[in-house]
Image: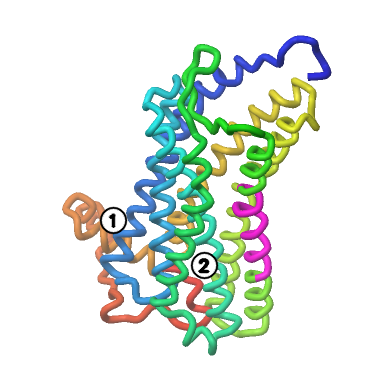
Amino acid sequence: YDDSSKPCSKEGIKKFGSHFLPTLYSLVFLLGLVGNSLVILVLFKYKRLKSMTDVYLLNLAISDLLFVFSLPFWSYYAADQWVFGDRLCKIISWIYLVGFYSGIFFIMLMSIDRYLAIVHAVFALRARTVNYGISTSLIVWLVAISASVPEMIFSESYKERNHTTCKPRYPGNSTNWRIFSSLEVNILGLMIPSVVMIFCYSMIIKTLLYCRSEKKNKAVKMIFAVMIVFFVFWTPYNIVLFLQLLVGLGIITKCEISKDLDYAMQGTETLAFFHCCLNPIIYFFMGEKFKKYVKLLFKSWAVPRMFFKRCGLLTTYHTESTSSFHTQSTGDQDAL
């Protein structure tokens, strides 16, 4: 670094993260596990995967679960060091990245799904089928798995300054691999999804403004909620990741800036992790059907049933077998 003849010491960064990262990772794990498991139970028990939207919601929940399953390992790693060996280092790093990419891709597909349902309603009658949903979902999984292969190949568990770490160790010209890895996350994880979402949701809003519907306001609120949550939780992480690339390339050389970016990475990465917990929360507070299905699901269990009875919530709700919920109109915005 050009601001000092001494090496840039970052011993305090690991210690700082060990104090709060394990707690936050554990919180994300619990919230993500409970919320996304509820989504899957509701989809299988009441929805029965009768539409393209249901297929995407199921795959999004699976992606988020895949993502959160890696967090207990990262939680222990943040608190101490990597003790799970080289093989698990590769597997957990790969699972983490597959869940990361697939989750963002399915959010993007759901944006396209809503766009077709509202802007091209007639075409959507033929295009938005369960078979098409399954086909596009398989493509997304293949892309996510392929994009994550370098992480699995290069991630290693090795000693670094008397501390066992788990991170990529690139062969040969590591600079090119670092550029590729960082830009891959920026492009696939933010730039492409952002362009698709901005186009789809701007066209949806434009269409809804010209149509009179009782559900128009709720649909617009859902759209803004999804977009704002996505950009607020993922943009800071991608910006810090890009700036860290500049440090690695020697473009940013000051030690203090480098350390500040390391602290910022811990914060923004944790913020991004919470995104996998928010989709079920958005569905619950903004999707009336999902809220009813969750109540119905809990009432089928003994202890929750006593709670709902005391709270006067034992109202009978119709399931998909007696009442169709999804339509090829603006009503489709009530995602569950």
Q: Which mark is residue 301?
A: none
* Extreme residue toward the top, this view: 6
Q: Please, what secondary structure does the residue beneath circle 1 have?
A: loop
Image coords of residue 53 (percent x, y): 44, 71
Image coords of residue 167 (percent x, y): 52, 31
Between residues 276 and 216, which one lies in front from this camera angle?
276
Please name the residue shown 41% across and 34% down the image: 26
Residue underneath mark 1: 311
Foreground mark, 2 or 1, reads: 2
Report the amino acid beneath label 1.
Cys
Q: Is residue 42 left or right of residue 274?
A: left
Residue underneath mark 2: 110
Q: Quadrant of the N terminus?
A: top right
Please name the residue shown 42% across and 64% down the image: 57
Please name the residue shown 80% across and 32% down the image: 251
Residue 283 lies in what quarter of the image?
Answer: bottom left
Please name the residue shown 61% across and 62% down the image: 224
Image coords of residue 215 (percent x, y): 53, 77
Image coords of residue 233 (percent x, y): 60, 47
Q: Quadrant of the C terminus?
A: bottom left
Q: Is residue 252 left or right of residue 273?
A: right
Q: Is residue 189 magenta?
A: yes
State whether residue 54 is above or below residue 3: below
Q: Please, what secondary structure does the residue beneath circle 2 have?
A: helix
* Extreme residue toward the bottom, this view: 122
* Extreme residue toward the right, this view: 2
Q: CA distance from mark 2 to mark 1?
A: 35 Å
Q: Earlier in the sequence, mark 2 or mark 1?
A: 2
Q: Which residues are magenta?
A: 185-199
Mark 1 is surrounded, within 10 Å at the Cα level, by few (under 14), some (14 to 19) or many (20 or more) other residues, namely few
Report the amino acid beneath label 2.
Met
